[in-house]
Image (cartoon, rainbow, N blue to C red):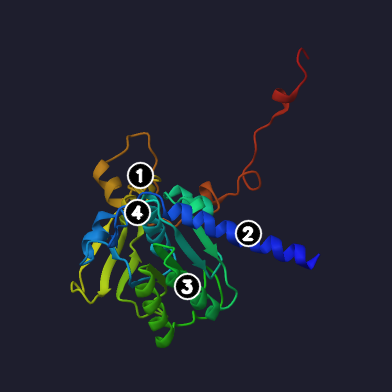
Amino acid sequence: MGAAVGRSGLAVVEELRERIRQLQAAPRRALSVLRTGVDAVDALLPQGGLPLGHSVELCGEAASGRTSLALRAVAAAHRELRLCAWVDGPKELYPPAAAALGVDLERLLVVRPQAFAQRVWAAVQLARSGAFTAVVVDLTLGVGAPGRPERLALTEARKLADAAARGGTLVLLLTSPEAPADGLARLRLEARGVQGWSVELERSRGGGVGTRVVSPWRELYPEVGLDAGARLLDADVEASGDAGPDFYRDPADRVRNGMGILGQRPGRDAPMPSLGSALSPAGR
């Protein structure tokens, strides 16, 4: 029984190796940088994109766009028929959302280590193998996770940089502002409400440090169009003028209490109309 299980495991590994060889043998063009598809972000980088063979950090709070920008980079690699890997530390990668951003799930290897040290070890092995164009390493705790994120040690950052150089792989580190890493470049991402999001080149050996771009959400999510219905702001209401003589508008100094019209709870405090006539049998 044990021998059968061992042969089955070896067969799976050999099948995976053969699949990787077939995908790598497909016609491709040489890449030195990986463009995210977000023109404003690509123009922010000195090389015109995310450089292969280096580690780049995407630093930001939750919902700042760091994961979506990494998915856009992975989707760009998949359009070139390349393989990518995702070390999903917080175990929050949602495949349908990734596919909506253009990710080819058949070309994405997802690894979910248990411990923080195992994330680094897995990323080093994946990047050093040279089989993957991009290896994304999520070093965050995830949404709602207790505690503070563990910071990447300098020796671990050097191991990742060395593995990226050996394998010619782009290593994307997803971090939070409380625990930044030491990549070749660092992009700081911030959400700016309905107006959009900002990206600042906070660290770079190629120059351009301190440059920033602010873009609408539709540039990051063109298929979804998040800001299509978020333009009814106070300025828009004032510019539109009075809605009409029959339109009732509460005075500006009145505070809504969340309990419905006139402070009543519908169906409980306000009297309900009689439904007897409507419920009487037909013909009665």
Quadrant of the rendered structure where residue 45 is?
bottom left
Quadrant of the rendered structure where residue 31 is?
bottom left
| Amino acid type indicated by mark 2 | Val
Residue 135: tell me if it is visible.
yes
Few, some or many C-alpha atoms within 10 Å of disc 4 (few <14, some 14-19, many ≥20)? many
Q: Give the percent coordinates (x, y) of residue 26.
A: 40, 50
Determine the secondary structure under disc 1. Answer: helix
Circle 2 or circle 1, nearest the eye: 2
* Location of mark 3 (residue): 123
* Location of mark 1 (residue): 228
Instruction: Give the residue displayed 50% in from the left and 81% down from the top.
Output: 148
* Location of mark 2 (residue): 12
Q: Earlier in the sequence, mark 1 or mark 4?
A: 4
Determine the secondary structure under disc 3. Answer: helix
What is the CA distance from the residue labelled 1 to the residue labelled 4?
Answer: 13 Å
Circle 1 or circle 4, nearest the eye: 4
What is the CA distance from the residue labelled 1 to the residue labelled 3?
Answer: 38 Å
What is the CA distance from the residue labelled 2 to the residue labelled 1?
Answer: 46 Å
* Location of mark 4 (residue): 220
Circle 1 or circle 3, nearest the eye: 3
Left or right of 190, for residue 139: right
Circle 4 or circle 2, nearest the eye: 2
Instruction: Give the residue displayed 41% in from the left and 87% down from the top.
Output: 155
Q: Earlier in the sequence, mark 2 or mark 1?
A: 2
| Amino acid type indicated by mark 1 | Ala
What is the CA distance from the residue labelled 4 to the residue labelled 2?
Answer: 37 Å
Few, some or many C-alpha atoms within 10 Å of disc 1 (few <14, some 14-19, many ≥20)? few
Few, some or many C-alpha atoms within 10 Å of disc 2 (few <14, some 14-19, many ≥20)? few
